[in-house]
Amino acid sequence: MSRLLNPWGRPRWLVAVTALYIAWSILPVAIAILFAFNNGRSRTTWQGFSIRWFTGATGSVLHDPALQSSLKHTLLLAVMCVGLSVPLGVTLALGLQRWRGRGGGTVNTLMLLPLVTPEIVMGVALLLLFLRVFPSLGLGTTAQAIGQVTFTLSYVVVITRGRLVSIGREYEEAAADLGAPPRDQLLRVVLPLLAPAIIASAAVAFALSIDDFVVTQYLSSDASTTTVSMLLYAQARGAPTPALNAIATVALVITLATLGLAFLVYRRFVGGAEAAVATALEM
Amino acid sequence: MEGEVRLEQLKKLFDEVVAVDEIDLHMPPGEFFTLLGPSGCGKTTTLRMIAGFERPTSGRIVLDGVDVARVAPHKRNVNTVFQSYALFPHLDVGGNVAFGLKYRRLTAKERSQRVAAILDRVRLSGFERRKPSQLSGGQQQRVALARALVLTPRVLLLDEPLGALDARLRKDLQVELKALQADIGVTFVFVTHDQEEALTMSDRVAVMRDGRVEQVGTPREVYEEPQTTFVADFLGVSNILHGEASADGGDGCRLKIGDRSLRAASGETGARGEAKAMIRPERIGLEPHGSDGENRLPGMVERNVFRGGSSEIHVRLVGGDVLKVTAPTDEDLHEGAPVTVHLPADALRILRPDPEP
């Protein structure tokens, strides 16, 4: 009892619950990754270490045509998604920042709507949109890219606006004061200052696109538009081999690497700014 | 000579709130002009309208004879030193200073010469490759100054540029900035809420309150001859006396306070009826108890506040009012000591009545 009452004691229960949660969330992923390196066809019985499911002559990530095509398509969609949602999202964020009249608040709320809409609802809605309203566009790669942009855009806008708010208007005013026309205020001052947010939102959009299943699945057309996540879903109940674990591992590594890189770059930029504040205070 | 600013009936509304209320000001070329007032008085909004960041609701901003009230900020030949400096963090000192030169027709050589010359001027030669984050507050302030001055503006606008610095550095920079301004002869429009700063540096000061100009004059005028209670109060410590003004026969007037009558020889001596008078603490004389003569009042020391170079003595008059008096520290004036205060007639100033709110 006395330990429980001791306010300086370690909160043992919290530590235990946290550790348990971390183990529970990491364990399945760890096991899945482990079996990607299994030297046999089983995904449940360990038969020794090998990288045959990554680079082997048959059925591996490197040589199986279905796996190859899904990986390529996933990356293609991710690049398209980043390429469309980042410029659009940054433009939207800049526009919303300057929107001073009525309706600004409404648009703000609407921008956040895709973040809370259940993905299945958005998937069905987009499917109907492409089938009924824009049948000429049809399903397939373009539809999938547009669908992914629809919900990643909100993340880009939210991240960029956060940075815009912290930058404030003063740098733009300073640029204008020094003679820069509006175009140069944007290119020479605002965009360089937004760089960390742009990099971060690109990484988030990339990761979201790779991970997405529901919307991408709804808007797919044929086998050539199958992504890694769709392949995993379809084959998990069919004739699964550790090649599925291998390709999932590849997707996971790409996602983590992207996010890690973005974090490092972001910290370099923003960390620099924080260091600046610290130095200024010391002086 | 260029650099004349004339504000005519300048007004700014934010929604329904009046920030600047139809002010008229004239800043002749080469003047160090200060807008002084408490926060919310409209001084910064006025400066931002001259810079072009805020659009006036009505009125004119005449720069060297041309109304620029509707001209975009990047097309005005005025430059600003921001309160937070707003140095571009992604550019080094050289990049910051050269930023605006891109919009002048200059060769690369002329540009780098100008940058070098202005950095030399603000004693920052050799700092070209440093990032703003690697500079001290005072150095950042000088980069901000160089970045604006390299464009040889007709008018330099300064928005509390010393506000973020510590007290000692402020004092040094006040003198330095004033010397720089006198040297280059550019019109400075300086915004501050610090009365001492305003008095030290300015050629003329406009004291602002609630979007209006209360008084414009040289530092000596606004300090020694304040026209309103607000100006008297805002510029240093002042004693305000309430009384009844009446004619005196001469060029002064009599001010009746309770059963005492004082002669006041400065300010609005034509005032009659209810009036307020002001006197600075350093103009009040302290005399031994029982001294006789014109404008002398008996009182009692209530408090003796040590101020370093001098003491501030609070004297309670017989009528109940408390006067603050500046006295040398060596005077032995303990609490409760009876004294006589002398309010010289030429230092007792009748104030203009406050406008009806």
Image (cartoon, rainbow, N blue to C red):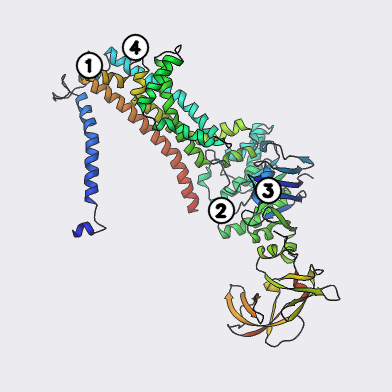
Q: Nearer the viewer, mark 4 or mark 2?
A: 4
Identity of the residue drawn at 68% across and 57% down = B201
Mark 4 to mark 2 CA distance (whole Å): 64 Å
Q: Amino acid at mark 4?
A: Asp
Q: Nearer the viewer, mark 3 or mark 2?
A: 3
In the depicted view, which residue is nearer to us: A40 or B140?
A40
Mark 4 to mark 3 CA distance (whole Å): 65 Å
Looking at the picture, how far across and down is residue B207, in whole percent? 70, 57
Q: Residues within 10 Å of mark 3 (few under 14, many from 20)?
A: many
Residue underneath mark 3: B46
Q: Amino acid at mark 2?
A: Ala
Identity of the residue drawn at 42% across and 35% down = A265
Q: Nearer the viewer, mark 1 or mark 4?
A: 4
- Camera sees residue A32: yes
Q: Nearer the viewer, mark 2 or mark 1?
A: 2
Disc on res. A222: 4
Horizontal placement of A17 versus B69: left or right? left
Residue underneath mark 2: B164
- Subunit of mark 3? B
Q: Secondary structure at mark 3?
A: helix
Q: Nearer the viewer, mark 1 or mark 3?
A: 3
Residue underneath mark 1: A56
- Subunit of mark 4? A
Q: Do the residues bearing badges 1 and 3 touch, measured as CB atoms within 8 Å?
A: no
Identity of the residue drawn at 43% across and 15% down = A132
Q: Residue furthest right?
A: B249
**Quarter placement of the N terminus of chain A:** bottom left
Looking at the picture, how far across and down is residue B296, in whole percent? 73, 82
